[in-house]
Image: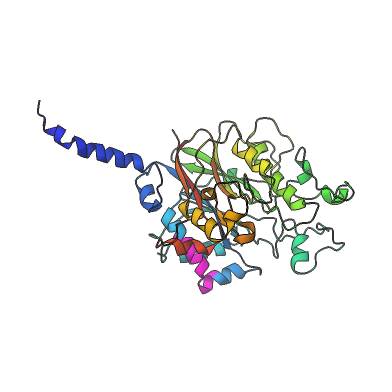
């Protein structure tokens, strides 16, 4: 037997070690790490701040050439997710805003980005933000009005219908006929709903006639089945209202918690005849279904103004895969730079996904939570440290993209 192959043993061990490393998304260049794992699924969530206070404003921004959109596209070109939910992307019914962003930004190389990236499939649908309710939802004695007064009386806060909408982009086909949306579900239909109370009297803050009509979702809740080469993955997408901008009754705080709880109910066992989608089909997600919950959930497990138990209970749900929390080096530097380290935050700075200034600090509010049934390969928050050549591209939004790499065994 020849002993010559033994001469290559050290080299072989190095190659095997490098191959193992691609399963962990080290910071450097995530696009290169992902390129070596063609059998995996990278799923991401990104609040992109691509909205306008005026109807049609996002289309005009994109047509004129928008620096924020360029930076967002550069991030996506570097991370290259297979499926990504974009929060705060204004809904335009004819798809023109999505088309402009995809063709004019994602499919063109951006400064600081990687190669152009194409998503053949997308899903967008109406949201509650900016849609007039015809009701006095903020309790100021009037219905509608101008500016913030108008937004407060919309089904979800917004200055025009579709503001702060959602856009799902995918490299794999979307089963559009099987999509379920829960935009119309009434808050009062949720068992044990956190009905806001007037702290001065202890009485319900919304009159019964309003409470019985108030919708739960401030934007929408989507179950979007994506047909991957290894089977269908249900993308559960939402963007709950921020738990602030209300009064002592804390109606937004309560709504945020219950919007998050809707996903817990949806993935839990039981008949749930109350859980009816916009097409009238009732019940939760099949027990055998694989899913990833994505979105800016506006709730940190340890800090901020949200009811933390809402997100903690989702993270600890038996059907949500236990995995290391995505992190970044840049988040730690940012927390120290803006004084956030002095706010008494209990959560690890490395887990933060948004930069909200010295008064609020940085928080973990964006999530990509896979279900059991996946093999978890890794995950990161795209937040380069200071001095990194790609650091400026994250400034297109006050949020950072978070992603997970998965494999279906």
**Quadrant of the rendered image containing residue 341:** bottom right
Task: Tell me the quadrant of the picture where the C terminus can be found.
Answer: top left
The residue at 60%/46% (across/down) is 346
Q: Nearer the viewer, residue 82 or 346?
A: 346
The residue at 70%/65% (across/down) is 159
Q: In this view, which residue lies farthest toward the front?
A: 342
Q: Is residue 106 visible?
A: no
Left or right: 128, with 213 as reference point: left
Q: Main secondary structure of the magenta part?
A: helix
Q: Residue 14: horizontal and vertical position, in percent?
A: 25, 40
Give the colour scheme of this rendering: rainbow
Picture mark count: 0
The segment highlighted magenta reads 62-74
Q: Residue 85: horizontal and vertical position, in percent?
A: 55, 52
Q: Is residue 139 visible?
A: yes
Q: Is residue 195 highlighted in magenta? A: no
Q: In this view, which residue lies farthest toward the left?
A: 2
Q: Is residue 70 highlighted in magenta? A: yes
Q: Residue 368: horizontal and vertical position, in percent?
A: 54, 45
Task: Tell me the quadrant of the picture where the N terminus can be found.
Answer: top left
**Quadrant of the rendered image containing residue 60:** bottom right
Left or right: 147, with 174 as reference point: right
Left or right: 266, with 83 as reference point: right
Question: Residue 130, relative to residue 263: is it above or below?
Answer: below
Q: Residue 291: horizontal and vertical position, in percent?
A: 55, 39
Q: In this view, which residue lies farthest toward the bottom?
A: 64
The residue at 77%/38% (across/down) is 192
């Amino acid at each position: 037997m020849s002993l010559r192959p033994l001469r290559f043993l050290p080299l072989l061990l190095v190659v095997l070690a490098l191959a193992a490393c691609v399963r962990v998304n080290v910071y450097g260049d995530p696009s290169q790490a992902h390129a070596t794992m063609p059998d995996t699924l990278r799923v991401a969530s990104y609040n992109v701040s691509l909205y306008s206070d005026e109807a049609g404003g996002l289309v005009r921004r994109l047509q004129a050439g928008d620096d924020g959109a360029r930076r967002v596209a550069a991030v996506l070109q570097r991370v290259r997710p297979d499926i990504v939910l974009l929060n705060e992307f204004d809904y335009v019914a004819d798809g023109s805003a999505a088309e402009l962003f995809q063709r004019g930004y994602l499919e063109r190389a951006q400064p600081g980005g990687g190669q152009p990236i194409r998503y053949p499939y997308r899903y967008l649908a109406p949201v509650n933000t900016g849609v007039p309710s015809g009701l006095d939802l903020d309790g100021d004695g009037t219905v509608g009005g101008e500016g913030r007064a108008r937004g407060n009386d919309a089904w979800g806060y917004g200055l025009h219908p579709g503001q702060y909408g959602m856009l799902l982009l995918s490299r794999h086909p979307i089963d559009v006929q099987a999509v379920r949306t829960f935009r119309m579900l009434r808050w009062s239909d949720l068992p044990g709903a956190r009905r806001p109370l007037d702290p001065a009297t202890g009485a319900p803050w919304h009159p019964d006639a309003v409470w019985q009509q108030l919708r739960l979702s401030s934007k929408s809740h989507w179950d979007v089945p994506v047909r991957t080469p290894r089977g269908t993955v249900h993308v559960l997408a939402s963007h709950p209202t921020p738990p602030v901008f209300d009064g002592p009754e804390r109606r937004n705080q309560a709504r945020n918690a219950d919007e998050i709880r809707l996903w817990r109910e949806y993935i839990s066992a039981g008949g749930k005849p109350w859980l009816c989608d916009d097409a009238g089909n009732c019940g939760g997600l099949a027990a055998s279904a694989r899913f990833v919950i994505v979105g800016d959930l506006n709730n940190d497990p340890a800090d901020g103004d949200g009811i933390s138990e809402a997100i903690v209970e989702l993270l600890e749900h038996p059907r949500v895969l236990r995995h290391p929390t995505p992190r970044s080096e840049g988040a730690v530097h940012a927390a120290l730079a803006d004084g956030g380290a002095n706010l008494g935050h209990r959560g690890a700075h490395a887990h933060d996904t948004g930069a909200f200034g010295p008064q609020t600090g940085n928080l973990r509010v964006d999530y990509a939570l896979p279900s059991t049934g996946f093999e978890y390969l890794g995950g990161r928050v795209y937040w380069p440290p200071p001095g990194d050549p790609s650091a400026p591209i994250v400034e297109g939004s006050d949020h950072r993209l978070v992603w997970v790499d998965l494999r279906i065994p």
